[in-house]
């Protein structure tokens, strides 16, 4: 690798990282970040997006208006760039008009470089955009997204198309799903070189922990513009971390780069940001990359309060079986509601709690805070007790059976169940069969399960419930066993605007409609729409 070859390190932290915080960055952080990037030898800072006005609130770096950038006292020994999506430029069919509305003459702007991010289908339409930006005096980059796994002839054709554009300075490719390998990158660079003789750039995502290896492979194959972000901050699994790239480049003889200069901003700012927003590679992002799932799906699904772990697994399974390389809110909604469970069942609970009260014990704070009163209630009133999954706060001696309906939770609690001798209510699908022998077949009551939105019904050896959650599954067992009424402990509830809160209220509403004579009473504090009493009143 020739360290004498001129390369350009472009840091796009504020642009790519803004997907997590709506492009709202503290002013002091921005100052420390720019100072650190400058000292580290970064050549270009992509300061943000350049977008037209939006309907909702976004921070300053979603627009990167010239008048705002001029308040930042930007240093002149680093070039500054902004990015605009091709869909913005092509929106109303008059690309030149859109560009004139977004960009003044280069001589009047602190921005030197404009990057256009384009999907493959948009590339052929961007010649006028490149030409107009060049007329205004900007250096122009074209970033082609989602090129991984495309045939060489497709890449070659894209490169030849880009080569016809008057004024294009750099042609980029983005490993949008983070699912490329170094060999794939090298082949892609060679394909682009067959149609493009100018500067080449690479933007690597880190879903499979290959971002550094892929970028260095691209460098070795002839790319000279290299993207990265501080701490890898970026959508989904994030990007190549600037500090790692600079360190690797210095080890390869590029002495102008000093990764240690980023330590202050890393420690003071980005450690906290990463803890708050949780970007970075994990096995879920790895699987998403493997199946070509747009990283925004995983990012949204993992937001606090969005879905629980079971629903996340269901959603990922749904997304890998549909075209999901382009993000859409509609597909996200379908994925969040996805569940293909259909287990007929072999056990009929009729008579299990005939004429008795059933106490459903969940793993909420109310159970741990009031466990002594719950224990006394069970000993005194002798209800049939169903633990919703394994609840550590209640002694197994007080539990009549455990209800489990999702594989991920079953796997987690298998060691606890193995040590107990209580029955387990479980829909035995293909996955659950792997663990039945660990539980003991004689302990497993295979009560079937089918998922159908807005339905709550029984069918002898199984039930149909609106979503795969253990609470409606246990409620169905109570109803099927002819219980007198249902008591709840540990059903604390969530904040009113939390989707999980509304889901449970929907479940209770559907249950009351299906079984109007069966009373539900919460005995520990609950914010759900159920009758409230007190464990201490009995």
Image: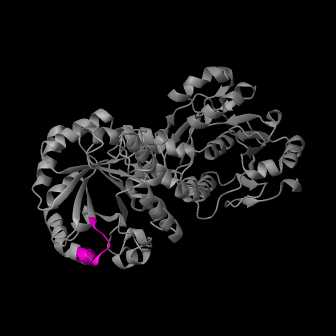
Q: Please state if 421 lies on the left or on the right of 178 as rendered.
A: right
Q: Please state if 82 lies on the left or on the right of 132 as rendered.
A: right
Residue 361 falls in image quadrant:
top right
- Image: 504 above or below 211: below
Q: Does the magenta stretch include residue 492?
A: no
Q: Is residue 112 magenta?
A: yes
Look at the image and give the residue range highlighted in magenta.
Answer: 102-113
The one nearer the camera, 381 or 206, is 206
Q: Can residue 3 be seen in this view?
A: yes
Q: Please state if 195 lies on the left or on the right of 90 as rendered.
A: left
Image location of residue 202, percent across then percent down = 29, 48
The one nearer the camera, 252 or 197, is 252
Image location of residue 485, percent across then percent down = 74, 49
Image location of residue 445, percent across then percent down = 65, 29
Residue at image point 26% right, 49% down = 6
Q: Please state if 151 lies on the left or on the right of 395 as rendered.
A: left
Residue at image point 15% right, 60% down = 125
In the image, farthest residue toward the left = 164
- Image: 380 above or below 168: above
What is the image's colouring?
one colour
Where's the N terminus, which quadrant?
Answer: top left
Q: Can residue 93 be seen in this view?
A: no
The one nearer the camera, 102 or 45, is 45
The one nearer the camera, 424 or 354, is 424
Image location of residue 375, percent across then percent down = 86, 43
């Amino acid at each position: 690798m020739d360290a004498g070859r001129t390369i350009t390190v472009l840091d796009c932290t504020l642009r790519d990282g803004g997907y997590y915080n709506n492009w709202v960055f503290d002013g002091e952080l921005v100052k420390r970040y720019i100072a650190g990037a400058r000292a580290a030898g970064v050549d270009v800072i992509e300061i943000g997006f350049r977008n037209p006005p939006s309907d909702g609130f976004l921070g300053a770096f979603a627009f990167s208006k010239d008048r705002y950038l001029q308040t930042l006292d930007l240093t002149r020994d680093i070039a500054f760039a902004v990015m605009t999506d091709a869909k913005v430029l092509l929106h109303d069919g008059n690309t030149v008009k859109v560009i004139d509305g977004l960009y003044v003459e280069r001589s009047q702007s602190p921005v030197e470089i404009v990057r256009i991010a384009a999907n493959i289908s948009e590339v052929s339409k961007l010649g006028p955009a490149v030409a107009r930006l060049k007329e205004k005096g900007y250096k122009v980059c074209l970033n082609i997204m989602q090129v991984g796994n495309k045939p060489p002839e497709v890449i070659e054709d894209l490169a030849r198309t880009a080569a016809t554009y008057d004024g294009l300075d750099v042609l980029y490719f983005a490993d949008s799903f983070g699912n490329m390998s170094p060999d794939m990158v090298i082949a892609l660079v060679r394909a682009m070189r067959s149609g493009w003789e100018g500067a080449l750039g690479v933007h690597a995502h880190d879903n499979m922990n290959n971002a550094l290896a892929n970028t260095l492979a691209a460098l070795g194959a002839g790319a000279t513009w290299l993207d990265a972000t501080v701490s890898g901050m970026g959508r989904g699994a994030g990007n190549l971390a600037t500090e790692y790239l600079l360190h690797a480049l210095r080890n390869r003889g590029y002495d102008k780069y000093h990764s240690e200069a980023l330590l202050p901003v890393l420690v003071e700012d980005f450690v906290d940001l990463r803890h708050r927003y949780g970007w970075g590679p994990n096995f879920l992002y790895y699987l998403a990359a493997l199946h070509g799932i747009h990283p925004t799906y995983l990012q949204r699904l993992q937001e606090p309060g969005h879905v629980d772990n079971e629903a996340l697994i269901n959603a990922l399974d749904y997304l890998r079986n549909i075209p999901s390389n382009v993000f859409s809110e509609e597909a996200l909604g379908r994925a969040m509601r996805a569940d293909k469970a259909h287990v007929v069942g072999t056990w009929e609970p009729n008579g299990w709690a005939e004429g008795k009260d059933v106490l459903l014990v969940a793993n909420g704070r109310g159970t741990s805070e009031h466990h002594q009163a719950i224990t006394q209630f069970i000993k005194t009133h002798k209800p049939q007790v169903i633990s919703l999954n394994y609840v550590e706060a209640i002694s197994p001696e007080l539990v009549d059976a455990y209800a489990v309906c999702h594989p991920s939770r079953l796997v987690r609690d298998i060691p606890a169940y193995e040590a107990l001798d209580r029955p387990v209510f479980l829909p035995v699908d293909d996955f659950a069969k792997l663990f039945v022998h660990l539980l003991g077949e004689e302990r497993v009551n295979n009560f079937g399960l089918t998922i159908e939105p807005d339905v709550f019904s029984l069918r002898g050896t199984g039930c149909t419930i609106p979503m795969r959650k253990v609470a409606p599954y246990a409620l169905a067992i109570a109803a099927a066993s002819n219980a007198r009424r249902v008591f709840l402990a540990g059903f604390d509830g969530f904040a009113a605007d939390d989707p999980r809160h509304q889901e449970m209220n929907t479940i209770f509403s559907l249950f009351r409609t299906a079984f109007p004579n069966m009373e539900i009473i919460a005995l520990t504090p609950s914010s759900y729409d159920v009758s409230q009493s007190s464990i201490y009143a009995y």
